[in-house]
Image (cartoon, rainbow, N blue to C red):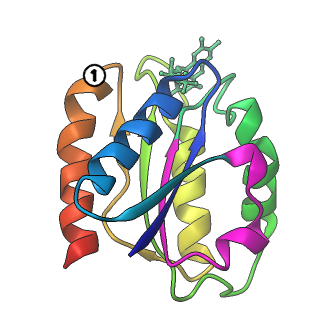
Amino acid sequence: MEVKIIYGSETGNSETLANDAKKSLSASGIDAQVLDMQDVKLSDIKEYKNLILITSTWGDGEPPSNAMDLHEELTSASGADLAGLNYAVFAIGQSFYDQFCKAGKDFDSSLAALGATRLAEITLSDDDFDDTFPEWIAKIKDLLLK
Ligand SMILES: Cc1cc2nc3c(=O)[nH]c(=O)nc-3n(C[C@H](O)[C@H](O)[C@H](O)COP(=O)(O)O)c2cc1C
C-alpha cells in the first residue's frame, strides 16, 4: 500500500511529524513517502490513493509559506476530481489564536469538497502534539490497514 504524507511547515514542527508518520507506517510495511507541500499540486494529488496531510497555521489563519500555493489551488478548485482518495488531516496550531488551526481546517474541507473520503475527522492539536500525534498516527495506520 502506498501513502503520501504532505506537510505545511514554517519552523519544522509539521515536517518532523511527517517524518515520524513515515517511520510509523514503514514499520508496518506501508510504502510511505514524505513530500514538502511546495512540491505538490492538485494534479499530483489526483494520482494518490491515500493521503496524510499535516500542517501548521501562521499569520492570522494563513497556511505556512510552503503550503500557500497548494492551499490556493485546492480552495479555489471545484468538481469531484478526488473521488477515490482517502485522506486524513492532522492540524497543529496554538489555541490562543482566534484562527486556531485554520489552514488545516481549510485543507480538510477542500479535500472533502473535491470528493475525497475522510479516513477520520480532522484532529486539531495545540502545542501538545508530541503527546497526541503517536496515538493519532497509530489510529490512522489501523484505518489504512483495514
Ligand atoms: C507569528 C505566528 C502566527 C501564528 N498564527 C497562528 C494562527 O493563526 N493559528 C494557529 O492555530 N496557530 C498559529 N501559530 C502557531 C503555529 O501554528 C505553531 O507554532 C506550530 O507549532 C508551528 O508549526 P510549524 O513549525 O510546522 O510551522 C502562529 C505562530 C506564530 C509564531
Q: What residue lies at 53% left-to-right and 73% top-to-bottom?
A: 112
Q: Nearer the viewer, residue 75 or 19?
A: 19
Q: Nearer the viewer, residue 83 or 101?
A: 83
Q: Nearer the viewer, residue 72 or 132?
A: 132
How many discs mark residues in the rendered view? 1
Q: Position of residue 145 (x, y in %)?
A: 22, 74
Q: Quadrant of residue 11?
A: top right
Span shown in magenta: 37-54
Q: Quadrant of ligand 1?
A: top right
Q: Is residue 40 magenta?
A: yes
Quadrant of the image containing the C terminus? bottom left
The relative height of residue 134 versus residue 106 in the rendered view (above or below) is: above
Quadrant of the image containing the N terminus? bottom left
Q: Position of residue 54 (x, y in %)?
A: 49, 44
Q: Is residue 41 left or right of residue 113?
A: right
Q: Position of residue 70 (x, y in %)?
A: 75, 53
> Where does label 1 land, which residue?
128
Q: What residue lies at 68% left-to-right and 37% top-to-bottom?
A: 63
Q: Secondary structure at mark 1?
A: loop
Q: Is mark 1 within 8 Å of ligand 1?
A: no
Within 10 Å of the Cα at label 1, are there few (<14), some (14-19), or many (20+) other Cα atoms? few
Q: Nearer the viewer, residue 75 or 50?
A: 50
Q: Is residue 78 magenta?
A: no
Q: Position of residue 135 (x, y in %)?
A: 17, 43
User: Which residue type carries mark 1?
Assistant: Asp
The relative height of residue 102 versus residue 51 in the rendered view (above or below) is: above
The relative height of residue 27 versus residue 11 in the rendered view (above or below) is: below
